[in-house]
Image (cartoon, helix red, strand yellow):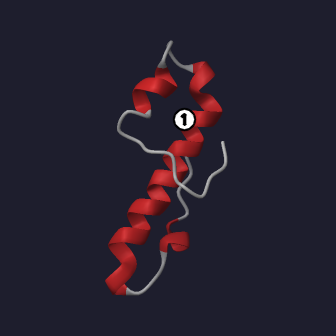
Amino acid sequence: MIYFDFSKAGVSLERLEKCFETYCNVVLYLFIKDYASYYYDNFEEKCCIWLKEPRYIKS
């Protein structure tokens, strides 16, 4: 299950879109990393084509 706590994306209106996108990217990236083995072969590789590793997460 993916859990989004959108209060963590809370910032000023000027920065909301960028912070919201960044937060969602991090949540999805961590989900893919943690649960890739439960899905089909190359799941992580195929998902990461469109989802870039957040620069502040150490692999």
Q: Is residue 5 above or below residue 7?
A: above
Q: Is residue 5 left or right of residue 48?
A: right
Q: Position of residue 46 (x, y in %)?
A: 41, 25
Query: Is 49 in front, or is 32?
Result: 49
- Name the residue: 60% across, 20% down: 38
Q: Position of residue 35 (x, y in %)?
A: 61, 30
- Name the residue: 45% across, 61% down: 22
Q: Is residue 30 above or below residue 6?
A: above
- Picture mark count: 1
Quadrant showing the N terminus: top right
**Residue 16 visible here:** yes
Q: Position of residue 53 (x, y in %)?
A: 51, 46
- Name the residue: 44% across, 45% down: 52
Say which residue label 1 marks. Answer: 32
Quadrant showing the C terminus: top right
- Name the residue: 57% across, 26% down: 36
- The type of residue carrying mark 1 is Ile
Query: Is 35 in front, or is 42?
Result: 42
Disc 1, SS:
helix
Q: Is residue 30 left or right of residue 53?
A: right
How crowded pointer 1 is (Cα within 10 Å; few <14, some 14-19, many 20+) is rated as many
Query: Is 54 in front, or is 15?
Result: 54
**Residue 1 visible here:** no
Q: Position of residue 7 (x, y in %)?
A: 53, 73
Q: Most extreme residue toward the top, as rendered?
A: 41
